[in-house]
């Protein structure tokens, strides 16, 4: 009997919290029935911090709260790779950090965080090439740096996920797939995000083509969608702070139903592959941005996150992909019986 396709639901919990406090995040996710979250921005009493800035005492406090609310980290939602490839002034605010220093400090910190939060996954990006320069000429440097990041993760028994996003070297599926093939490392997988393609002016057939380019290397999904108010046209450089039209997954222009239906048969094989690396399964991370999004994150509120979750579940139910939300047994388990 063929194995049933199954995913693990997760999400960026900071999107559900009005003030990004840990208690708000975990309470919202627990109420929605989620047991996994990707940690990105969080406040545990000392103001809102990116996960990369957390202290040991703050991590300890978060771990205690995770236990109280029955939460587990699916991935470290790090900004690794959202820095310039070259120290060139190009009118953007993106920082440049010499790569040797970046590898020894920031990448090592992300690996330490993954171990501290007992996750095997780190989310990252493919670097900013100088604006208005052909990105093709920057692929070799990008590949070299990502190869070193993948190896650092591999030595720590971790997997690095490369997200498709505007304005980066790997801004679409074709370029990201080429980078992945050139790096050719078991610790590097790709993260599909349809919304990040629609914002660049890809229509549904175009998004599907970019997905197909990435398909064999996908490790997990981010669930976000977008609906242009006017005609969809290709955009060379996206002003991420001006994006205002994020929508639930069943209302946007990504064509998620077709994509997930196509990926359905790949889920059992990918699940086994990930489990061999200590990863529990194939995650779908909710990152809906329903109340706004930008370069380093977004916001949906507890109500928006609930809408996004129900939208995703409707698609999964229609296709026949299984998932699990909390039930009474989970409620009893948090009480120790």
Image (spheres, rainbow, N blue to C red):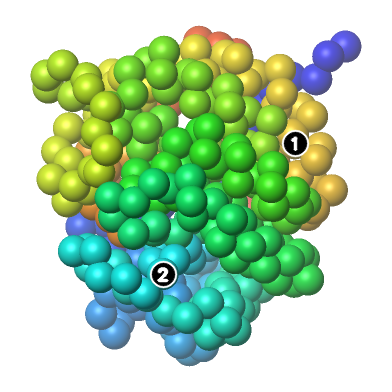
Quarter of the rendering containing residue 198 = top left
Q: Residue at left 11%, top 19%?
A: 230
259 sits left or right of 94 in the view: right
- Give 98 or 122, whichever is nearer the viewer: 98
Split into 4 quadrants, where in the image is the N terminus?
Answer: top right
Whole-angstrom CA distance, mark 2 to mark 1, is: 37 Å
319 sits left or right of 286 in the view: right
Secondary structure of the residue carrying tag 1 is helix
82 sits left or right of 152 in the view: left
Residue 276: image x %, image y %?
84, 48
- Give 137 or 211, whichever is nearer the viewer: 137
- Give 117 or 245, whichever is nearer the viewer: 245
Residue 162 visible here: yes
Q: Residue at left 20%, top 57%?
A: 18
Quarter of the rendering containing residue 86 = bottom left
Q: Which mark is residue 271?
A: 1
- Look at the picture and state if 34 lies above or below 209: below
Quarter of the rendering containing residue 152 = bottom right
104 sits left or right of 88 in the view: right
Q: Earlier in the sequence, mark 2 or mark 1?
A: 2
- Look at the picture and state if 287 lies above or below 252: below
Residue 266: image x %, image y %?
71, 23
Residue 21: image x %, image y %?
30, 68
Mark 2 lies on residue: 86
Query: How many neighbours does mark 1 have within 10 angstroms: few (below 14), some (14-19), or many (20 or more)?
Result: some
Q: Nearer the viewer, mark 2 or mark 1?
A: 2
Residue 336: image x %, image y %?
64, 61
- Look at the picture and state if 53 lies above or below 67: below
- Look at the picture and state if 301 lies above or below 95: above
Split into 4 quadrants, where in the image is the C terminus?
Answer: bottom right
Query: How many neighbours does mark 2 have within 10 angstroms: few (below 14), some (14-19), or many (20 or more)?
Result: some
């Amino acid at each position: 009997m063929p194995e049933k396709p199954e995913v693990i639901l997760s999400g960026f919990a900071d999107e559900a919290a009005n003030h990004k406090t840990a208690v708000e995040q975990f309470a919202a996710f627990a109420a929605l029935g989620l047991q996994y979250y990707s940690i990105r921005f969080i406040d545990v009493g000392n103001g809102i911090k990116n996960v990369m800035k957390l202290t040991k005492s703050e991590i300890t406090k978060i771990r205690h709260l995770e236990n109280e609310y029955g939460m587990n980290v699916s991935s470290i939602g790090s900004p690794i790779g959202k820095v310039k490839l070259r120290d060139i002034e190009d009118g953007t605010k993106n920082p440049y950090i010499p790569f040797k220093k970046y590898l020894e400090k920031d990448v090592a910190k992300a690996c330490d965080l993954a171990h501290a939060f007992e996750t095997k996954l780190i989310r990252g990006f493919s670097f900013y090439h100088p604006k208005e320069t052909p990105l093709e000429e920057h692929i070799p440097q990008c590949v070299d740096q990502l190869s070193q990041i993948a190896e650092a993760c591999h030595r720590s028994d971790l997997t690095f996920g490369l997200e498709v996003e505007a304005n980066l070297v790997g801004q679409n599926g074709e370029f990201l797939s080429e980078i992945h093939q050139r790096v050719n490392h078991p610790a590097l997988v790709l993260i599909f995000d349809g919304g990040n393609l629609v914002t660049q002016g890809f229509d549904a057939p175009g998004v599907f083509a970019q997905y197909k380019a990435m398909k064999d290397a996908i490790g997990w999904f981010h669930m976000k969608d977008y609906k242009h108010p006017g005609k969809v046209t290709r955009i060379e450089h996206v002003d991420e702070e001006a994006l205002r039209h994020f929508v639930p997954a069943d209302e946007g222009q990504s064509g998620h139903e077709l994509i997930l239906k196509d990926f359905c048969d790949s889920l059992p094989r990918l699940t086994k592959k990930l489990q061999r690396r200590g990863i529990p399964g194939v995650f779908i991370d909710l990152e809906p941005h329903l109340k706004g999004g930008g370069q380093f994150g977004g916001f949906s509120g507890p109500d928006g996150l609930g809408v996004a979750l129900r939208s995703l579940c409707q698609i999964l139910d229609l296709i026949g992909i299984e998932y699990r939300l909390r039930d009474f047994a989970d409620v009893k388990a948090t009480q120790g019986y």
